[in-house]
Image (cartoon, helix red, strand yellow):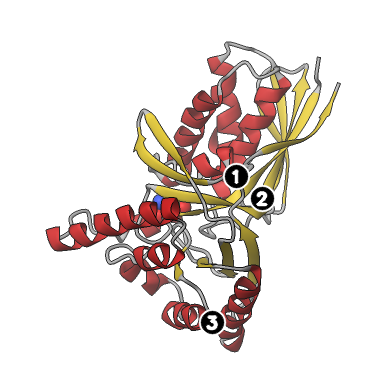
């Protein structure tokens, strides 16, 4: 019988411009690491969190990793005591799917600890519930790509109906995280609940264009379809120098650039590693010029998603 399992779940870029709450893809790094261990003491405990600066709740039911493990044990009707160790490598409130990476890594780890009694689709349902705990809305555009990897369309959240989309082999992503924090809950509140029909028409044309571009391997179609007339203009106001960063990414060779999830991270897609590196330098120069600390990540679309790192008998 396994006594402990450690798993990793990657950062994710949600929305991808035009697809608010319906598109997301995984990148290779950074990601969160969660270890779950059997305990003789009943109940689920978060025994240790590192990398969060002491800011995440340690009560298991308040933390997305703990909440996910509690729901998992309920599902399999187990009274097994579990200790959770969470290593945060994703910055909080970054728009990189931080809460999702924690819950998904925890679910993959605890499912493996019990020899995979729960299907991955049911793990997804639990992870979506954990997102509701984290930001007040049950959306799957971070948890689904963190779990499965790849570029995912969320056709429906409840019940989850997810579609894995093809990705052009040479597609690269540059993500820059400026060191400011935006809570998803707040970034969702500033979005208008109603939109003019003309804007809706533009947006659903773009979402269809993006899917077509992925299938046709047409990077230019992907790039021009990423354009978001509804969410980005409102949220961009929360990110200092967003317009300048986006402009420099495009002039440096990006096919498209937008806010990653609810921000403040900004991502750009490009056709090669060399392009992605050039874009990284140009985006970074903007934030550095304004003395805003930042981190840059370059990756292809991660096709693996969450994975087991280690297990102990
Ligand atoms: N689709 C969500 C949002 C992602 O934009 O609010 C949050 O990471």
Residue 31 is labelled as: 2
Q: Residue furthest right?
A: 313
Q: Are marks 2 and 1 in contact (CB under 8 Å)?
A: yes
Distance (Cα) linking label 1 and label 3: 30 Å
Q: Indicate the quadrant containing the C terminus: top left, top right, bottom left or bottom right.
A: top right
Quarter-of-image position of residue 227: bottom left
Q: Local crowd at mark 1 within 10 Å, few (<14), some, or many (≥20)?
A: many
Is 231 placed left or right of 170 in the picture? left
User: Where does the image place residue 100, in percent across and percent down from the top left?
Assistant: 54, 44
Residue beneath the point at 46% across and 39% down: 133
Residue 280 is labelled as: none
Q: Local crowd at mark 2 within 10 Å, few (<14), some, or many (≥20)?
A: many
Residue 202 in view in this figure: yes
Q: Residue furthest front?
A: 216
User: Where does the image place residue 275, in percent across and percent down from the top left?
Assistant: 60, 74
User: Where does the image place residue 52, in percent across and percent down from the top left?
Assistant: 67, 53
Residue 101 is labelled as: 1
Residue beneath the point at 58% across and 54% down: 301
Q: Indicate the quadrant containing the N terminus: top left, top right, bottom left or bottom right.
A: top right
Disc 1 element: helix
Residue beneath the point at 56% across and 79% down: 283
Q: Local crowd at mark 3 within 10 Å, few (<14), some, or many (≥20)?
A: some
Comparing 121 with 295, the one in front is 121
Distance (Cα) linking label 2 and label 1: 6 Å
Q: Residue furthest left?
A: 197
As displayed, is residue 212 above or below residue 81?
A: below
Whichever of labels 2 and 1 marks the residue nearer the N terminus, that label is 2
């Amino acid at each position: 019988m396994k006594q402990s399992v450690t798993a990793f779940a990657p950062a994710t870029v949600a929305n991808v411009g035009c697809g608010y709450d319906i598109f997301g893809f995984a990148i290779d790094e950074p990601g969160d690491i969660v270890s779950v261990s059997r305990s003789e003491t009943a109940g689920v405990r978060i025994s240790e969190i590192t990398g969060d600066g002491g800011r995440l709740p340690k009560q298991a039911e308040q933390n997305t990793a703990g909440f996910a493990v509690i729901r998992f044990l309920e599902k399999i009707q187990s009274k097994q005591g579990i200790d959770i160790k969470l290593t945060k490598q994703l910055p909080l409130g970054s728009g990189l799917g931080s809460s999702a990476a924690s819950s998904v890594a925890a679910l993959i780890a605890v499912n493996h600890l019990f020899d995979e009694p729960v299907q991955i689709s049911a793990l997804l349902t639990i992870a979506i519930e954990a997102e509701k705990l984290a930001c007040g809305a049950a959306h799957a555009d971070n948890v689904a790509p963190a779990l499965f990897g790849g570029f995912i369309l969320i056709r429906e959240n409840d019940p989850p109906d997810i579609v894995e989309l093809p990705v052009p082999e040479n597609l690269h992503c540059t993500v820059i995280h400026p060191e400011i924090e935006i809570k998803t809950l707040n970034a969702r509140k500033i979005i208008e609940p109603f939109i003019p029909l003309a804007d809706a028409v533009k947006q659903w044309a773009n979402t269809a264009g993006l899917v077509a571009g992925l299938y046709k391997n047409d990077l230019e179609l992907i790039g021009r379809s990423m354009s978001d007339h509804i969410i980005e203009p409102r949220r961009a106001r929360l990110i200092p120098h967003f317009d300048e960063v986006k402009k420099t990414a495009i002039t440096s060779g990006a096919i498209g650039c937008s806010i990653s999830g609810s921000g403040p991270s900004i991502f750009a897609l490009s056709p090669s590693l060399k392009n992605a590196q050039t874009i990284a330098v140009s985006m970074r120069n903007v934030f550095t010029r304004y003395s805003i600390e930042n981190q840059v990540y370059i990756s292809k679309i991660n096709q693996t998603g969450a994975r087991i790192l280690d297990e102990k008998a």
